[in-house]
């Protein structure tokens, strides 16, 4: 018989005991080894006395062997615990030769040889890493987490001959201490390391794990083992705590305690009415079982499971039991992403860690086992955890799980995906790849700009609205920065009543193109070809592919190729809906065309905001003045180095979007900010860009390029081009007076009017002046102007139409008394037609007074022909 001594203490604890082994008896029948027959009580070089526990198997291969002892349940956190033993490893520690002692574990030796299916506390050398230090780890879900590293280097401080006395003490509340005496005396041990990690569960197993190469087996001994603490004898049979339907073939059973494996994996201890016993049973944790059936459970059908003959590790038999269950296959948006902390630094009051909160909005329990969480390019598989109806769950990195425990239910995930501060996609899928929930979050959803700097979570307003229009997300109003694990601070009602809008078309092939919608679509309806129709005789596509996971992009394929130069109309049926069931809002359809090569002058820079209000973005507007269609994916914006004239900061403006004749497009890093600032705008014209070329507040150069880096238009601006009577220029855009006049003509630019809100992004410029059809060579329009920046006749334009090219002009402005006011142009090479503008400023930059002014025009050509013409205008002001 083994030598084991139980000592019951007299102090006020319900139960107490000590486990003691000095191995002076050769019987270790209560110990279990895996693989079997590799350990024995041996007299070969004993550590103490005549016998020691010794690894005694001469292996021809490298291996990991383990041996374990089942004890009564130990509860260290109630009164503490002390483990003592002596150990000798007669070979230097390395990555391939090392040992670990399981002080407390939930499973026997078989599972100590691998980390994947056992939880516990392990003291050892090089169990992880190769630094040869004696360390204590917490092992959970296959991951080692270091609790403490001692000052003991086993190779240099202990060696291969010594068998030191090792003492590990756990104090209630979470303090650990490791003490050692290299000479082997427990009365002389000294503290070599301390750490903190609270034990939250009892354990039943003590064990040793020994890893060795084929020439270094049989070199580990242990002796004088004792475990002191609060042991409570187990006299209660196990009960079923919960049953989870994992999928249509599998049940997960979770018991109140560990189940004896031999009976647990016998299928004949279980029976489902109408289906019989499972085909197989797997013990995946000491108290968790998976039952696999060959027949399928029907959706929302009711079943009954019967169980009998199961025992716990102490032999207590479970009474025959039965329980009902319903199979419900998880559906789209049963569980939703409800809160996102993508930028936790600087923190407000919450832990400075990224997290995602999910919410079970269904009426069924949801087992997340093998669900797939994806963010960016990272995918992680979730462990088994059950969410009750109405439950919130915080997902975060394993290393931060403890910090979130006070806020609610937490699932620590090894390798939790990093969340991009610039925005990105997050989605959760079932094990078979079906989409459960999806969000494409955006920093612009924050309601206050300062909260984009970090520490504030984005919260969903209405979890019952799963289709995620951006208005259903707001910055948390909770003073701590978020509400992980509970109802959101911004919770309210936000129904989705608006239909999706087809925002843009991208040509992807000769006979196919992509339609991008404003929100996620119903995937089945989006994939239905009958919901789309293209005119010019094309009809329905022969294939439609809605792209996972958002289903907000649908690629359509036709038999015939699209013709260059033609503009088509794609229309939608009412049966095409978003995921909330709202039909598409493009009642008249959306235009489709094959884009052409962009050439100089086809598009122009039409409006620029280079000095925005603080913390607000610049924007650049372009205008398609041609009769052709272009692809924004082939268009770039750049600046120009003023020192060497080289292009600088070249950025592509879009991945692809069609620009039709007469279209405006506005490029900015934050469309919502610009839209909120300027009431004269067209929201459909905005294109969000990751980067814009630098636009200095005083002067700069903006260049429009095609894919061959050919200059399409170029605008060199200065602050002096603004209307001089403005008190400040912040937030005021420069508008082009007419897109047919050149960008380098300073008189062709003017401050946006006050009545238009100092900017007109995406719409006709407030200072736009149409060039009239000229019957005379020179025409003044308007004849009366008022340069007060109200958007009405703020400049006077002198339009010309010459009979032939080659004329040069000098144009001077005089007042009614014949005094020179402004030299508008000197030796100006004229085109066949064009215009010159006057904004009411005199040569010195001051504002001219009200009255009559005369344009004195002198034009001549190389043949010596000269024309002198006078035209008048009136400068007026409001009384």
Image (cartoon, rainbow, N blue to C red):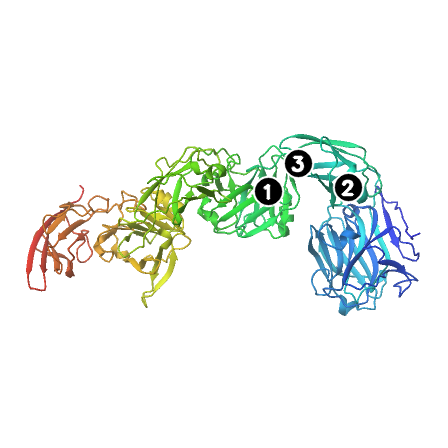
Q: Residue at x 14, y 51 (%)?
A: 798
The residue lying toward the viewer, choosing from 245 and 75, is 245
- The image shows residue 741, relative to residue 480, as above or below, that is below
For this view, does 574 lie left or right of residue 369?
left
Could you tell which of marks 2 and 1 lies nearer the N-terminus? 2
Numbered marks: total: 3
**Residue at the (40%, 46%) spot, across then down:** 513
Any mark on residue 296, and which? 3
Question: Counting residues from the N terminus, which is met first, the one under dot 1 or under dot 3?
Answer: 3
**Left or right side of 287 for 2:** right
Crowd tier of the residue under label 2, counting other residues whose Cα lies within 10 Å: few below 14, some 14–19, many 20 or above:
some
| Residue 257 marker | 2
Cα distance in 3D space between marks 2 and 3: 29 Å
In this view, the residue in front, 319 or 479, is 319
Q: Nearer the viewer, mark 2 or mark 3?
A: 3
Instruction: Name the one closer to the observer, 212 or 836.
Output: 212
Residue at far bottom of view: 156
Residue 460 image position (x, y, % from top left): 51, 39
Q: Position of residue 332 (x, y in %)?
A: 55, 38
Query: Separation of disc 1 and disc 3 at Cα?
Result: 17 Å
Q: Badge 3, how many Cα within 10 Å: few under 14, some, many 20+?
A: few
Query: Which callout, 2 or 1, points to the residue nearer the camera?
Result: 1
């Amino acid at each position: 018989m083994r030598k084991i001594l139980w000592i019951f203490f007299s102090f006020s604890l319900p139960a107490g005991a000590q486990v003691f082994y000095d191995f002076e008896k050769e019987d270790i029948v209560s110990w279990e080894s895996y693989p079997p027959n590799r350990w024995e009580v041996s007299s070969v070089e004993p550590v103490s006395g005549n016998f020691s526990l010794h690894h005694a198997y001469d292996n021809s291969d490298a291996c990991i062997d383990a041996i374990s002892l089942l004890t009564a349940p130990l509860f260290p956190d109630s009164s503490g615990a002390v483990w003592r033993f002596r150990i000798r490893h007669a070979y230097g520690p390395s990555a391939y030769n090392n040992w670990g002692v399981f002080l407390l574990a939930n499973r026997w030796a078989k599972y100590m040889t691998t980390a994947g299916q056992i939880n516990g506390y392990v003291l050892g050398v090089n169990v992880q890493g190769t630094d040869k230090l004696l360390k204590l780890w917490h092992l959970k879900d296959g991951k080692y987490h270091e609790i403490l590293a001692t000052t003991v280097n086993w190779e240099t401080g202990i060696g291969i001959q010594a068998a030191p006395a090792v003492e590990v003490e756990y104090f209630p509340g979470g303090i650990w201490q490791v003490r050692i005496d290299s000479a082997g005396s427990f009365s002389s041990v000294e503290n070599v390391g301390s750490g903190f990690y609270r034990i939250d569960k009892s354990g039943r197993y003590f064990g040793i794990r020994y890893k060795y190469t084929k020439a270094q087996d049989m070199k580990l001994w242990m002796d004088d083992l004792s475990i002191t603490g609060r042991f409570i004898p187990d006299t209660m049979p196990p009960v079923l705590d919960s049953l989870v339907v994992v999928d249509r073939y599998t049940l997960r059973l979770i018991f109140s305690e560990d189940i004896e494996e031999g009976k647990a994996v016998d299928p004949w201890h279980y029976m489902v009415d109408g289906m019989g016993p499972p085909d197989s049973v797997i013990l995946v944790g000491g108290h968790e079982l998976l039952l696999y059936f060959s027949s399928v459970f029907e959706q929302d059908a009711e079943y009954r499971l019967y169980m009998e003959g199961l025992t716990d590790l102490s032999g207590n038999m479970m009474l025959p039991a039965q329980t009902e269950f319903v199979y419900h296959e998880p559906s789209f948006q049963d569980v939703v992403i409800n809160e996102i902390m993508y930028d936790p630094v600087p923190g407000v009051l919450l832990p400075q860690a990224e997290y995602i909160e999910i919410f079970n909005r269904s009426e069924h329990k949801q087992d997340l086992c093998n669900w797939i969480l994806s963010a960016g390019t990272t995918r992680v598989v979730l462990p088994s955890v059950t969410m009750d109806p109405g439950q919130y769950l915080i997902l975060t990195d394993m290393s931060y799980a403890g910090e979130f425990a006070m806020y609610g239910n937490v699932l620590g995930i090894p390798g939790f995906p990093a969340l991009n501060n610039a925005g990105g996609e997050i989605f959760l899928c079932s094990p078979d790849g079906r989409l459960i929930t999806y969000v494409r979050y955006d920093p612009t959803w924050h309601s206050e700009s300062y909260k984009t700097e970090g520490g504030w979570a984005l919260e969903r307003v209405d979890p019952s609205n799963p289709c995620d229009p951006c208005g259903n997300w707001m910055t948390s109003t909770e003073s701590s920065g978020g509400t992980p694990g509970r109802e959101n601070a911004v919770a309210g009602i936000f129904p989705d009543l608006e239909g999706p809008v087809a925002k843009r078309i991208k040509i992807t092939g000769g006979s196919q193109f992509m339609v991008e919608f404003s929100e996620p679509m119903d995937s089945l309806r989006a994939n239905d070809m009958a919901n789309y129709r293209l005119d010019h005789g094309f009809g329905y596509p022969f294939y439609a592919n809605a792209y996972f996971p958002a289903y907000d992009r649908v690629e359509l394929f036709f038999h015939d190729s699209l013709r260059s130069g033609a503009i088509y109309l794609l229309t939608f049926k009412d049966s095409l809906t978003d995921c909330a069931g709202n039909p598409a809002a493009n009642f008249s359809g959306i235009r489709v065309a094959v884009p052409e090569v962009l050439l100089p002058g086809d598009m122009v820079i039409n409006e620029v905001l280079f000095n925005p209000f603080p913390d607000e973005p610049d924007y650049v507007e372009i205008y398609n003045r041609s009769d052709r269609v272009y692809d924004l994916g082939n268009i770039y914006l750049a600046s120009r180095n003023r020192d060497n004239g080289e292009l600088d900061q070249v950025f592509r403006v879009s991945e692809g979007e069609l620009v039709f004749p007469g279209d405006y497009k506005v490029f900015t890093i934050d469309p919502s900010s610009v839209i909120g600032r300027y009431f004269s705008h067209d929201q459909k014209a905005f294109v969000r860009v990751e980067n814009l070329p630098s636009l200095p507040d005083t002067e700069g150069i903006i260049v429009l390029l095609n894919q061959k880096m050919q200059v399409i238009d170029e605008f060199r601006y200065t602050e002096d081009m603004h209307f001089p009577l403005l008190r400040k220029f912040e937030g005021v855009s420069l508008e082009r007076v007419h897109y047919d006049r050149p960008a380098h003509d300073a008189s062709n630019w003017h401050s946006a009017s006050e009545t238009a809100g100092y900017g007109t992004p995406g719409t006709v410029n407030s200072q736009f002046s149409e060039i009239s059809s000229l019957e005379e060579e020179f025409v003044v329009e308007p004849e009366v102007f008022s340069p007060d920046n109200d958007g009405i006749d703020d400049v006077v334009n002198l339009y010309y139409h010459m009979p032939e090219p080659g004329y040069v002009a000098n144009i001077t402005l005089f007042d009614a008394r014949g005094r020179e006011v402004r030299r508008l142009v000197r030796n100006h090479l004229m085109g066949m037609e064009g215009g010159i503008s006057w904004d009411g400023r005199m040569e010195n930059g001051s504002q001219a007074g009200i009255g009559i002014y005369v344009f004195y025009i002198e034009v001549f050509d190389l043949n010596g022909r000269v024309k002198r013409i006078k035209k008048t205008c009136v400068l007026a002001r409001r009384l």
